[in-house]
Image: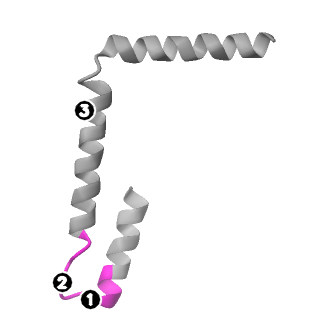
């Protein structure tokens, strides 16, 4: 996200430095990132995340043994 924001800043300052429009896509990405984080870490509960990670690790171990 930081790399893309930096690229937008460069494009913005080269083409239209009088209006800083790069802020709007950055705010949109930030809002999306915030809600994604809330959905992953807050609303699903930590036990659900932990269970998924354990299941994934078990499947990974089983596939390595075969």
Give the CA separation, mark 3 to mark 2.
Answer: 32 Å
Element marked by disc 1: loop
In the image, residue 4 sits, relative to residue 35, either above or below, namely: below
Q: Nearer the viewer, mark 3 or mark 2?
A: 3
Check whether the beta carbons of the residues at disc 2 and disc 1 lie within 8 A of each other.
yes
**Which mark, residue 16?**
1
Residue 33 placement (x, y as % from top left): 30, 45
Residue at mark 3: 38
**Which mark, residue 1?**
none
Residue 58 placement (x, y as % from top left): 61, 10
Based on the displayed image, in which of its 4 quarters is residue 39 positioned?
top left
Residue at mark 2: 19
Q: Is residue 62 magenta?
A: no
Total marks shown come to 3
Check whether the beta carbons of the residues at disc 3 and disc 1 lie within 8 A of each other.
no
Element marked by disc 3: helix
């Amino acid at each position: 996200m930081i790399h893309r924001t930096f690229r937008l800043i460069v494009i913005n300052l080269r083409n239209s430095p009088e209006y800083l429009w790069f802020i709007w896509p950055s705010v949109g990405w930030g809002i999306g990132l915030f809600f994604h984080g809330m959905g992953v870490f807050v609303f699903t509960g930590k036990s659900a995340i932990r269970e998924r990670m354990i299941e994934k690790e078990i499947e990974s171990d089983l596939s390595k043994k075969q």
